[in-house]
Amino acid sequence: AKYNVAVLGATGVVGQTMLDILAERDFPVDRVFPLASARSAGGTVTFGNRTLDVIDAEEFDWSQVQIGFFSAGGSVSAKYAPIAADEGVVVIDNTSEFRYEPDIPLVVPEVNAHDLANFRNRNIIANPNCSTIQMMVALNPIHRAAGITRINVSTYQSVSGTGKEAIEELAKQVGDMLTGRPAEPSVYPKPIAFNVIPQIDVFQDNGYTKEEMKMVWETQKILGDESVLVNPTAVRVPVMYGHAEAIHIETRDPIDAEGVKALLRESEGIEVFENDSEYPTPVEEGSGSDLVYVGRIRNDISHPTGVNLWVVADNVRKGAALNSVQIAEVLIRDYL
Ligand code: A2P
Ligand code: 11C
């Protein structure tokens, strides 16, 4: 069977990557409809070696498609997802709009593909936040084997997570600062060039940012285990593509660094750097790649059941577009 698909937010960083990945993976598409706002309707995007005209989402007839990939922001999903779902479209939503609703599956295929069984509840499936996805791919095998009780994580997140305006802001500020001009922040609250910003998304009442709380809520939902404690700090760094995370775990049952390496070596979607002197970085492994890369696996010298890991992935691909396409691949294989 072949499917008609819509990509909402097709002119954005994630949307264009969704189109690229659908083409690369030979997803069984019949017709592809790239949707965006009226601002870019009339422009074009690429799909493989074809050029497609961008359609104004406002004017789109959703009954023409079976699958919708949404990545145009939470309020845009809030508006169009129910309309599409009512027309029978399976919506795979990459925003935080529906993630925490109990009857909506929140899925990382390597971890909890079984939760897709409930996709007809609302015809909406949520794609998790990028920083949560790469952490789940790396930690789920350890959780199944030894029971993770607590996760301490600090993130080093690239600007592509914010979107195309943030990529342009970093590039411009780098140029400005190298030529002696002041960096003028607009997308971010502080200069991002040659800087690090310990704020991603808005502050919550408890003093954590929303990005940090997403990592708490989504981890528990994806693992199906509310007992897993998460202590996150999310930081934006002047990197274009690829998120990195320094993760420390405590486990119920003893497992050491060698045990973790042995587990992850056999796990889906992961490449392990086993030699201590080799490790992944966002520019090399985290840009344009599909796996989750894990290195610096070492015993916690301060705790009897603690292990440290360094986890890198392409936030636009595995953290967003690729994960959404993988969800669709499981759907068409097992359910549609
Ligand atoms: P547009 O090009 O019309 O602004 P990014 O995350 O890289 O900033 O991309 C955001 C994506 O979401 C773009 O494709 C953008 O389209 C799209 N978008 C933003 N607002 C809307 C809207 N109100 N309706 C449809 N698409 C939208
Ligand atoms: C970032 N994690 O890197 C964000 C982007 O909830 O899907 C993704 C936001 C989300 O800025």
Image (cartoon, grey):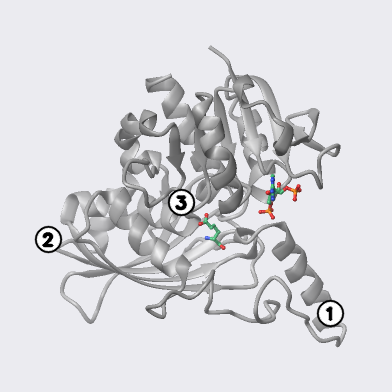
Helix, strand or loop at label 1? It is helix
Q: Nearer the viewer, mark 1 or mark 2?
A: 1
Q: Amino acid at mark 1?
A: Asp
Label annotation for residue 134: none
Residue 284 in view of the camera: yes
**Is the residue marked 1 within 8 Å of ligand 1, measured from its CB?**
no
Q: Amino acid at mark 2?
A: Asp
Q: Which residue is mark 3?
A: 292
Helix, strand or loop at label 2? It is loop
Tell me: residue 89, above or below residue 41.
Answer: above
Please give left or right for residue 266 compared with residue 255 in the image.
right
Q: Amino acid at mark 3?
A: Val
Nearer the N terminus, badge 3 or badge 2? 2
Nearer the N terminus, badge 1 or badge 2? 1
**Is the residue marked 2 within 8 Å of ligand 2, measured from its CB?**
no
Query: 167 or 310: which is nearer to us?
Result: 167
